[in-house]
Amino acid sequence: MAAEVEEFDVIVLGLGPGGEELAGGLAEAGLAVAGVEANLVGGECPYWGCVPSKMMLRAADLLAEGRRIPAMAGESTVVPSWAPVARRIREEATDNWNDKVAADRFRDKGGTLVRGRGRITGPGEVTIDGTRRLRARRGIAIATGSQPVVPPIPGLAGTPYWTNHGAIEAEHVPRSLIVLGGGAVGTELAQVFRRFGAEVTVLEAAGRLLTAEEPEASELIAKVFAGEGMTVRTGIEVSRVDHHGAAFTVMTADGSHRAEKLLIATGRRCDLPAIGVGSVGLDESARSIEVDERMRAAEGVWALGDVTGKGAFTHIAMYQAKIALADILGEPGPAAAYHAVPRVTFTDPEVGAVGLTEAQAREKGIAVRAAVTSLSSSARGWIHRAEGLVKLIAGDQVLVGATVAGPCGGEVLGLLTLAVHSRTPIDRLESMIYAYPTFHRAVEDTLTRLR
């Protein structure tokens, strides 16, 4: 006998930050909403991403600050302990990876939580784990996020390597750690474990760390990492991984590296075939789902978050959720725009960036001017003895991109994000009053170099 079909107005596949926001908003508006989630309600960010990782980074930064005391304020002895970090992640951030609070929050808004893996099996139809069938009267929203990429390196499969999940859940700091990948996740976690005492080696296939950012920022982070005793190898290809006893051996063309733990941080991907997007006419071989400015992917289908390819950031998913919510409800609202997407790598120093890099702008054929200044050009930077920089990219008398690397780099970025988003003329930015002494004064200094 065929399973009975359950009817809803909207089915939301995936209850990460964006999916939860959208599904909850639709339910509060009075629609019958099914939120389908195979893992934890809330998604990657509160349990393994943004929140617990920044707890780790905050703790690591405190250790670094303590070690800076002798040069500026007296004597200090810093003795790292991982126990309070692990305890805080379990008790304060993740409830020991229990999503009851988030699940109850969604149900309290009037939503129906469906546990299981959903697959689109036809227009307006989703099947859960191959058995339970749901049908949507208005449509389906896809917010299924992304998964860590595990490269097909010989010997890697079947070994107890970490992804970011294992690193976040760690109860002890390993004696040594190899980080495969020098992007945001790899660099952040590498610095955390180094500051807590692990011997850390970072291996990156590209020619530099943080390849999505400006080269000047990459050079700064590589310099800081070297100063903290990390080994950083770029332009290196891993040929094999072995695991024997209590250690990994990672082999490359010019030697091998050995460590107790191996962290794979080589990016993330979206599994479109597993979602069944082909059944609604979308290309399952694509890297992401193409959406219009209202998050529409096809007739009766919306998509948001990582699957849209606009940036694997919680703030993108939340931004898109608001647009999709208005569209599904038939309400007016601004169309999506991505020319001023902010991003922050929370290393120390932080690397905050918005808009285009210099290389990206030139590839688009924009006649650009670029200027870079040291963060120490500001009195606050000099007082802090801060390592950092500001880089501004201008085209047609407005900023099209900016980078701030340094203490509070992500916070200083707010000013520049507004400038790029609103296309504020350079001369207007120059005529502003910048509080003294703040790190923002380095932005003012850099603007003068764009003339």
Image (cartoon, rainbow, N blue to C red):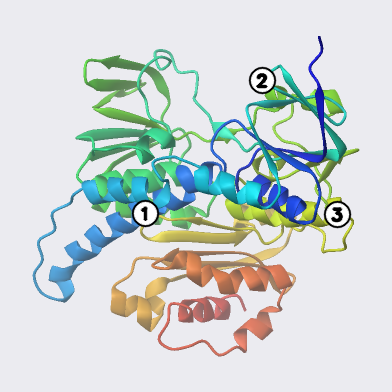
Name the residue carrying label 1. Answer: 55
Disc 3, SS? loop
Residue at x-position 23% and y-position 34%: 176
Name the residue carrying label 2. Answer: 129
Q: Quadrant of residue 392?
A: bottom right
Q: Position of residue 162 (x, y in %)?
A: 38, 30
User: Marks 3 and 1: in contact by CB < 8 Å?
Assistant: no
Quadrant that contains the N terminus = top right
Q: Is residue 449 left or right of residue 25?
A: left
The label on residue 223 is none
Residue 91 shows up from this direction: yes
- Please, is residue 128 above or below residue 424 in the view? above
Q: Is residue 184 left or right of residue 382?
A: right
Disc 1, SS? helix
Give the residue type that dot 2 points to.
Answer: Asp
Closer to the chain start, of discs 1 and 3, is 1
Q: In this rendered view, identify the residue nearer to me: 38 or 191.
A: 38
Give the residue type that dot 1 points to.
Answer: Met
